[in-house]
Image (spheres, rainbow, N blue to C red):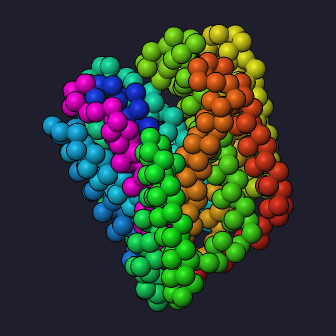
Amino acid sequence: MLCAAQFAVMVDVVVVNVALPSIQGELGVPQGTLQLTAVSYTVVFGSLLIVAGRAGDRFGRRGLLLCGLLVFTVASGLCGLVDEAWQLFAARAGQGIGAAMVSPNAMALLTSSSREGEQRDRALGFWIAASAGGAIAGQLLGGVLTELAGWRAIFLLHVPLGVLVFVVALRFLPSGTMNRSSTLDLRGAMLLTVSLAALSLLLAGVTKDSTIATVMGIVVLLVLASVLLVVERRHPAPVLPGGLIRRRPVLVANIVQGLTAGATTAAIYFTTLTMQGAMGYGPLQTGLGFAPVTAIVLLVSPRAGALVSRLGARNMLVLGTGIAAVGMGLLGSTATAFGNYWAGILPGLALVAAGNGLSYTPAYSVATAVPEGDQGASAGLISTTQELGAALGLASVAPVVAFIVGSEMSDFSMGYLISALMVIVAGLLALVIPAKSKPLVRAG
């Protein structure tokens, strides 16, 4: 049930991408603001993850999760009923608020209710399968639903599913624990949320057409970050506990996950452009091209959870990132050279999916190996790292490739190579993690 909620949340991150032309045509959305259909969800979602996770630690994860499911379901219904573009942007932001309340608290409930060791790692494997599978399946669902039932169907589908998950959660979900000994750092929460939102908007390229706006955005971000550091150091219970960052394995696992997510997002971006450009595939064909990837992730991730306890998180991270790097290198060699999906795309993409399926679970396992009272914050932190890593990877790799290759951007070999190098760096950093991490004794 918790994994089903996460699947729905991740589907909505990408599901609108292939529906944007249809949305633009029906609602008359100007080209300059069309990206807000996607950005209004991802920015709000990414900027609230840590705060929502910390609020769950303080006030109870079950309650936050149930509220989030209600908000997400209602907002999804509103998305399918809008008549104006601004209404869609607002409803998508509402989806982001609900999703941010659901995701970190669902993960914290999953990890805190599982026994340390193989059971917990196996549960995280299913969580990763739901997350990665939802993100990839979103591209397929977006194409199929838009073509067969119209773009509104991609939102309205969440309503009955959301109601079902809410009823099941209300009936069977345990309440968990609450840390009433500390107060929620409201100023820190507000500053962190605004800072992450500003960073997300910059990475999303919202200000790319205005140099002045970009510079002002960077200045505002630096000021907010500076004030946030001062406020957090003075507060007895900061929204992001300093103990999380000071734990070397947790910090390294977050960096590894951010690099891997960034490289993978860039590789998928280049693959999508190759399929729709050089190979001449339409949105539906492109979406179907990612179906085998979804199957691989769903098969590998749960099994990776069982392997973590036997091989160790560090070894699994090195193995997974190594396989993903080989896949990205293979895509760089074959995607354009062969000019067809079966020989040029599928083999490399399958290796990337298998590598991520093996590496994501140990990264999450290490990043969330913290005391019970910090489970929500750690879940929010690793989720935020992944979201920002994905945005930063695409925002940094794509311009570099455009500069090297030129404005036509028809050969993405260099992009795949840079992505592979990012994953290799992630694998090398994983060597810093101790071979055998001592399990934590959880409070409460």
Q: Which quadrant holds the C terminus?
A: bottom right
Residue 105 visible: no
The residue range painted magenta reads 25-54
The count of marks equals 0
Residues 188 and 166: in front is 188
Q: Position of residue 394 (x, y in %)?
A: 58, 40
Residue 41 in magenta? yes
Q: Is residue 45 left or right of residue 352?
A: left
Q: Position of residue 356 (x, y in %)?
A: 67, 41
Residue extending farthest front: 212
- Which of these two is toward me, 274 or 152? 274
Q: Position of residue 128 (x, y in %)?
A: 57, 47
Image point 79% across, 55% down: which residue?
Answer: 429
Vertical placement of residue 278 versus 263, above or below: above
User: Seen in the image, is 380 located left or right of residue 166?
Assistant: right
Asked if the magenta segment contains residue 156, the reply would be no
Q: Nearer the viewer, residue 78 or 164?
A: 78
Which residue is at 38% across, 38% downward? Answer: 35
Q: Nearer the viewer, residue 103 or 271?
A: 271
Residue found 70% across the figure and 29% down from its top: 404
User: Is the stretch drawn in magenta largely helix, strand or loop?
Assistant: helix
**In this view, 257 is above or below 173:** above
Q: Residue at x 32, y 19 (%)?
A: 147
Q: Quadrant of residue 168?
A: bottom left
Quarter occupied by residue 383: bottom right
As drawn, 201 above or below 284: below
Residue 405 coordinates in the image, percent (x, y): 68, 25
